[in-house]
Image: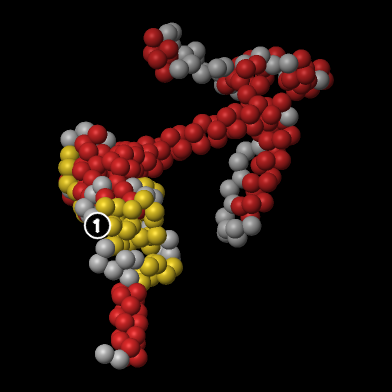
Amino acid sequence: MDINIVLPVVAFLVLLVALAGVRVVNQVERGVVFRFGRAQPQIREPGLRLLLPGVDHMRKVNVQIVTMPVPTQEGITRDNVSVRVDAVAYFRVRDPMRAAIEVQDYLFAVEQVAQTSLRSIIGKSELDDLLTNREELNKGLALMIDSPALGWGVHIDRVEIKDVQLPESMKRSMSRQAEAERERRSRVIVADGELRAAQKLADASGIMAQTPGALQLRLLQTVVEVAAEKNSTLIMPLPVELLRFFDRAVRTGPDTGPDTGSAVAGAEQVPPEEKPSPALAEAAAPELAPIAPPGQQAEGASAPPAPKRAGA
């Protein structure tokens, strides 16, 4: 057999065997090599790697962050409310050796743990916590999933609750509760405003009482404002001074002062030379006599006879 033919054939076979042992590891992957079924301690980094054909077997593990939606879980909260909750988990492989050896399918395992942990969180929490305190629940849920996942070489970055679905009856009840709370707040605000307005009015009345002219200025200001509205009729109130005058007159009573008495006395005085004669005064006396009320006239003495005239 010619050596020139054998050598090229052998070289070609060696090349085929070498090419069969060449593996390419991507940037986002790490390689775990099994030789005769035993895992090799050295992890294959990204690049071109050579394996022994027929002896070595390499398993590639993705080390990127995986986004896994957690299916909707139905449960009853601690305050006996039926809810449906779904979430999303973010995790990545930190130890490719454990992810390849310790668990058959780490993706499926993490998904199952996430579902059970989510149901556990629902049962331990109240409805208000699920609606308003999600950050703490997210942290607790991440810790619950991360605890078993560490043994699989998986690290949970974070878990977030996406949606909380409530029964229709509970939605209507919460709507009525929110409406009642808004009504209560509005009443408190209105009452507080009225209290402050009353305090301001009390302060203003005290200032006006100390300054009499302030009320007149306020009256003039009101007149100007009303006149600016182009009304055809303007009714003015009585002046305050006139009201005070009547108030003083009522308090004083029927007593008259010295000036009033002197004026009346002066009006009733008649000069001596103009005084009527005794006969005329006597004739005019009945006409000037006071007229008694009808009741007194009936009960009393009869009226005096009419005076006789001088010519009779």
What residue is drawn where x is 28% and y is 68%? 53
Q: Is residue 261 left or right of residue 145?
A: right
Q: Is residue 157 visible?
A: yes
Q: Camera-side residue: 309 or 45? A: 45
171 up-or-down from 127: above or below: below
Q: Residue at x 63, y 24 (%)?
A: 247
Question: Looking at the image, which is closer to me, 177 or 95?
Answer: 95
Image: 37 above or below 238: below
Q: Which residue sits furthest front? A: 1
Residue 233, placed above or below residue 189: below
Tell me the quadrant of the picture where the C terminus can be found: top right
Residue at 21% from the left image edge and 53% from the top image edge: 104
Q: Position of residue 204 (x, y in %)?
A: 64, 32
Residue closer to the observer: 197 or 21: 21
Residue where numbered disc 1 is placed:
36
Total tally of numbered discs in the picture: 1
* Left or right, 12 with reference to 286: left
Q: Nearer the viewer, residue 99 or 196?
A: 99
The image quarter containing residue 182 is top left
Give the percent coordinates (x, y) of residue 165. 23, 50
**Hey, what amino acid is under mark 1?**
Phe
Locate residue 34 relative to residue 244 in the image: left or right: left
